[in-house]
Amino acid sequence: MKNLFILFMFLASINFFGQTGKDYLLQGNAKFKAKDYEGAIKDFTKTIEINPKNGQAYINRAECEFLLNQKKEACDDWAKAVELGKLEAKARIKKNCKN
């Protein structure tokens, strides 16, 4: 219940002040922790729309996609994250993606 309350308060404050790419990233992270993977994907996608060079958003979205068995999308996002300098995504590609 405490986590849901924190998420509610966070979402309420964002709706009042407007959202930035960082806000969507944080909101997506909260939804990921709550296992709302589809909701998290939407927020990470908004982060990417605002800042297409945010490699962390690609990694985070890929993790959600992978958990939802959207493996091609996950592999594409991990590859984009590597392209943007997030080299930690290479291990996920090696383990989960066909060359």
Image: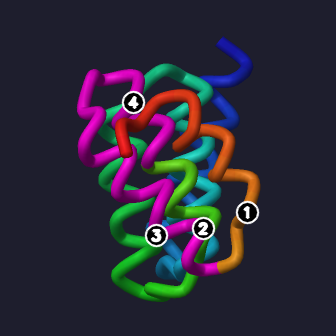
Q: Residue at x 56, y 67 (%)?
A: 81
**Which residue is farthest top?**
1
* Nearest to the observer: residue 25 or residue 5: 25
**Span colored in magenta:** 62-84
Instruction: Kindly identify which numbered label has been placed on residue 82.
Output: 2
Label 4: which secondary element: helix
Provide the residue designation for mark 4.
66
The mark that comes first in sequence, 1 or 2, is 2
The quarter of the image holding the N terminus is: top right
C-alpha separation, residue under disc 1 versus residue under disc 2: 5 Å
CA–CA distance in space, label 1 to label 4: 18 Å
The quarter of the picture where residue 94 lies is: top right
Task: Report if residue 74 lies within the magenta region.
Answer: yes
Q: How is colour applied across the structure in the image?
A: rainbow
Q: Are marks 4 and 3 in contact (CB under 8 Å)?
A: no
Residue marked by disc 1: 87
Give residue 17's quadrant in the image.
bottom right
Q: Nearer the viewer, residue 87 or 41?
A: 87
**Secondary structure beneath label 3:** helix
Q: Nearer the viewer, mark 2 or mark 4?
A: 2
Amino acid type for the residue under numbered disc 2: Val
Magenta stretch holds residue 97: no
In the rendered image, the vertical position of residue 55 relative to residue 78, given as above or below: below
Q: Is residue 65 above or below residue 89?
A: above
> At which x and y percent is residue 27?
55, 52
Q: Is residue 88 left or right of residue 60?
A: right
Q: Earlier in the sequence, mark 3 or mark 1?
A: 3
Question: Whole-percent x and y of residue 45?
Answer: 35, 64
Q: CA–CA distance between discs 3 and 2?
A: 5 Å
